[in-house]
Amino acid sequence: MRLALVPCICTALLLPACGDSGGARDSETTVASSITASGITLTAPMTGADPPGGTTQAVTTGELSGATGDASSSGPAMTKFDLGKDDTGGVDPDTGTQEGGCQKIDFLFVVDNSGSMADEQQNLATSFPGFITSIQNTVKAEDYHIMVIDTDAGNAFLQQCFVVCALLPNCEGYPCNNLPKAEGCDAMLGTGLVEDPSAKACGVAGGKRYMVDGQPNLSQTFQCLAKVGTDGDGSERPMEAMIAAITSLNGAGGCNEGFLRKDALLVVTFITDEEDDGKSKGTPAGWNAALVAAKVGAEKSIVVLGLIGDPDQPNPVCAVDAAEASPRLRTFAESFTFGSWGSICSPDYAPFFDASVSVIDTACQQFEPPG
């Protein structure tokens, strides 16, 4: 079980950060549209050329960990969702062959669990029911995997107890000289979550670390998972967590075994109020290459959505010190054909997700199942 600490220290120590400016995507290689609604801007490349470095570039462990270069370059019985669509599973009833477009989508949510993220997690949880309803009503795919991960490796309990133990002999009933440590999957960065921060099970069905098609109480389960808590490591590693979730942890016997499917569209949403500037290994180009390699070179089978700080942008939503400028994360999102980002400081994420549905739908329609 993931250990959690009931807040017992002054949260005023947890302050948001601010940052510097960043770059923009080459206008000659992508056609982008900007949609502004209710105080949130979605920069959504809808069509265009392949991202820098190509779409079939292989990535090795060495490239990911030491990449350099220009940052710009079995559970309850489950029933199928009733989406008001046919139940052919994407197979043409006349020919018995697979139809074009995506029939499956793997949704990965990477959520910052550091001390300044409570409001943003609530905003994400509130936005999800409308988002998934729009997906179900608009996008052709009917078979979903949905996984939520946080941005640390399960050491939040120890981190907080380090502060408490400087003043007291015990922390949450444990002697400071014998504190329990997260074990197994809970100690691994990128592991899918199944509990809330108090270690209460959120109801993920099927015995996996992600929700599958037919998950009972889908919205409530997601909302429980999305509130990943604010006791996480302040040195967030969202990109490293993202890559681990779909590579090393996705294989046979891994904590997230079976989440990522070759014949599914991958939709990654990351939400953080700080830049990933050296905390995760690699660079935006390396992170892009790692995702593309995980999808066997099919760059257009990936949709990337980021909610990040924008104080370095024209007409920012984030006030000074409300969130850190994130040029590296923005560059990463914009490096994908179907890559978009919005401001984490928006009071309502619904406009961002509403606009993202059309991007996901376009990617799904153009999806080519592996041969």
Image (cartoon, rainbow, N blue to C red):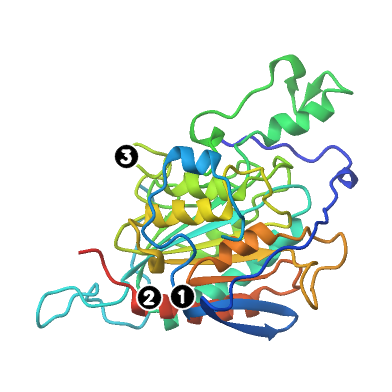
Q: Nearer the viewer, residue 156 or 241?
A: 241
Tell me the CA gap for discs 2 and 3.
27 Å
309 relative to 16, above or below: below
Residue 146 horizontal/vertical position (percent): 46, 59
Residue 52 horizontal/vertical position (percent): 49, 63
Q: Is residue 335 left or right of residue 95?
A: right
Residue at left offset 71%, top offset 41%:
235
Residue at left offset 71%, top offset 78%:
40
150 relative to 38, above or below: above
265 relative to 150, above or below: below
Q: Return the residue at label 3.
A: 252
What kind of residue is marked 2?
Cys
Q: Which mark is residue 360?
A: 1
What kind of residue is marked 1?
Ile
Residue at left offset 64%, top offset 80%:
351
Q: For residue 321, which quarter of the picture?
A: bottom right
Q: Which mark is residue 364?
A: 2
Residue 122 horizontal/vertical position (percent): 70, 62
Residue at left offset 43%, top offset 79%:
361
